[in-house]
Image (tube, helix red, strand yellow):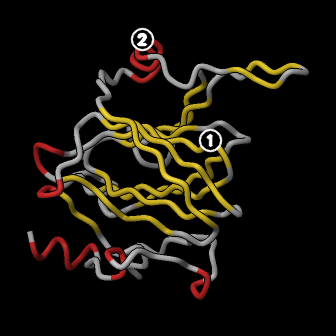
């Protein structure tokens, strides 16, 4: 496994070793032992999730608060997404900054998102199958979110605004500044 650092400490891109031949390919998508050795993170994933979405869907920017905060390991099985993580760790030198990474079924990249980040993605292909592991169970009472289009974050989702598809819930999240003021 190859580990690539982003501009935000602890937010890591993982590139698995892919073995291909005329039949297709094989790779280990996760090994707890290898993950711990390569990253020094001792994470125990307890829940796997999967979504399928069409072009233009933006999901996020979501997070779990407090004792239910989640670290995630995300990847795309089919299609292509722009995956975005925003640093919400108070006291972090990169607080309020984001990193964006293209994940696809072709590049097999994964993004490790530690606790303390908001997360979202935009589907860039016709459809995408997105999978992620979490180290804590989802708890509706601990759910938080910030606006996908927060002007201070200035995230380029690579989708024209008139083509963005959002859930009703994702239409009304506060900006990061509004969220901080409400804490």
Q: Residue at x 55, y 79 (%)?
A: 164
> Measured from the top left, where is residue 123 in percent x and y?
60, 63
Q: Quadrant of the N terminus?
A: top right
**Element marked by disc 2:** helix
Figure label count? 2
Residue 3, by quadrant, is top right
State the residue position of label 1: 77
**Element marked by disc 1:** strand
- Lower position in the chain sequence, tag 1 or tag 2: 2
56 to the left or right of 120: right
Q: Is residue 141 above or below residue 35?
A: below
Q: Is residue 41 above or below residue 182?
A: above
State the residue position of label 2: 33
Labels 1 and 2 touching (C-beta < 8 A) = no
> Measured from the top left, where is residue 170 in percent x and y?
35, 74
51 to the left or right of 41: right
Instruction: Nearest to the eye among marks 1 and 2: give it.
Output: 1
In the current view of this chain or complex, which residue is farthest to the bottom? 162
Q: Residue at x 55, y 64 (%)?
A: 122
Front one among 78 and 109 = 78
> Measured from the top left, where is residue 6 in percent x and y?
51, 45
Task: Classify 10 Å Cα crowding around label 1: few (below 14), some (14-19), many (20 and above).
Answer: some
Q: Residue at x 42, y 55 (%)?
A: 85
Q: Quadrant of the C terminus?
A: bottom left
């Amino acid at each position: 496994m190859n580990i690539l650092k982003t501009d935000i400490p602890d937010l890591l891109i993982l590139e698995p070793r892919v073995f291909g031949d005329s039949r297709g390919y094989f790779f280990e998508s996760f090994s707890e032992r290898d993950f711990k050795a390569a990253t020094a993170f001792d994470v125990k994933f307890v829940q796997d999730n999967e979504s399928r979405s069409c072009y233009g869907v933006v999901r996020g920017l979501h997070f779990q608060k407090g004792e239910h905060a989640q670290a995630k390991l995300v990847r795309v099985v089919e299609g292509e997404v722009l995956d975005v993580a925003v640093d919400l760790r108070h006291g972090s030198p990169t607080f309020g900054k984001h990193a964006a990474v293209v994940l696809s079924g072709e590049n097999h990249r994964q993004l490790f998102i530690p606790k303390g980040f908001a997360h979202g993605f935009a589907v860039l292909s016709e459809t995408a199958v997105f999978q992620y592991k979490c180290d804590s169970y989802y708890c509706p009472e601990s759910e938080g979110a910030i606006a996908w289009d927060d002007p201070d974050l200035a995230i380029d989702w690579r989708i024209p605004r008139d083509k963005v598809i959002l859930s009703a819930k994702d239409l009304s999240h506060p900006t990061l500044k509004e969220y901080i003021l409400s804490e």
